[in-house]
Image: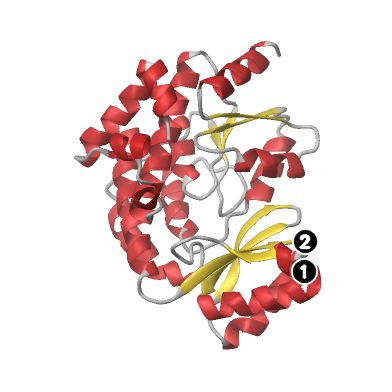
Amino acid sequence: MGLELARAYPAARAAFDEADEVLNRRLSELCFQGPAEALKQTENTQLAVLTCSIAVLRVVQELGITPRVVAGHSLGEYSALVAANALGFRDALELVQYRSRFMAEASGRQACAMAAILGLDEDTLDDYCAEAQSVGVVQVANYNCPGQLIISGDAAAVETVVARGAEKVGAKRCRLLPVSGAFHSALMEPAAIQLRSVISVFDFQAPRTEFVANVTGSYVFAPDEIRQLLVTQVTNPVKWEKSIRTIGDSGVSHVVELGPGKVLCGMVRRILDDAICLNVEDVRSLEKTVEVIRSN
């Protein structure tokens, strides 16, 4: 994760070195070498993804690519805020270190799960979640794109909704996800409370680049509101489809995903039919993205 860019671009390597210094551990070695099982642990995953994303951002910025609007999916909001100069990278690292630990602790308190539900409309899924409340907490966690919703909550309640959904759209379209917690659900309330207790000491600025928030799917400008929404986001759904439509309505034609993978590109294509979606995670994808952006 991030090794190729770190070898090719000093700006990327510097981001990993900065993370190692701030966290006082060799996060870079974990990103570059694994093991995969360690990277999957919430406390490591969030920091690794944040650092890789900022490493990519620094390279893209160095090459003269500047965004008009930024947004991030869940954890990605922290990278987006760094890109908007609303939050410093060092502060983002320390905040995400708290966030990941608090979420891991909340996840360990009970059996919890998340599941992808494909091809089911929001109203029907809401009804299924309401029916399953007698079993336990379950709610929509991510409104990702048309036809793709994610639910989160108590394992038994999630499994109940998955079974109901499978009756409607087929078992292959309703599946449990390999995650360690019930993220963006009421079960994360202990983590939200803890995050609220520490986030007030961190310095937030008004974004210099327009920023769209997960919780509202709309532009946010005030530092205090951004701080509060980061806390609210822990227990509330990611309104990704609404966020991307907000960005599309502003006239943005090119969407660039920075960091590991290109899952968000797939979602954006399903939301904005005419958007040009690019990603940067390694040297090859960087070169392609730079070529496309500079040709427009």
Q: Residues within 10 Å of mark 1 (few under 14, many from 20)?
A: some
| Disc 1: which residue | 170
Question: Number of numbered discs present?
Answer: 2
Q: Position of residue 280 (x, y in %)?
A: 55, 27
Work out whether residue 36 or residue 127 is closer to the camera in this orientation and state it. Answer: 36
Of residues 112 and 252, which is closer to you in this image? 112
Question: How far is the residue under mark 2 from the one under mark 1?
Answer: 9 Å
Q: Nearer the viewer, mark 2 or mark 1?
A: 1
Q: How is the image coloured?
A: secondary structure
Circle 1: element type: loop
Give me the residue at 73% from left, 30% from top. 251
- In the image, 154: left or right of 87? right
Above or below, 192 relative to 7: below
x and y percentages locating residue 219 in the rendered image: 59, 42
Left or right, 48 with reference to 236 = left
The amino acid type, in three-letter code, at marker 1 is Gly
Q: For mark 2, what is the residue?
A: 119
Q: Quadrant of residue 99?
A: bottom left
Which residue appears at 70% of the width and 33% of the height? Answer: 250
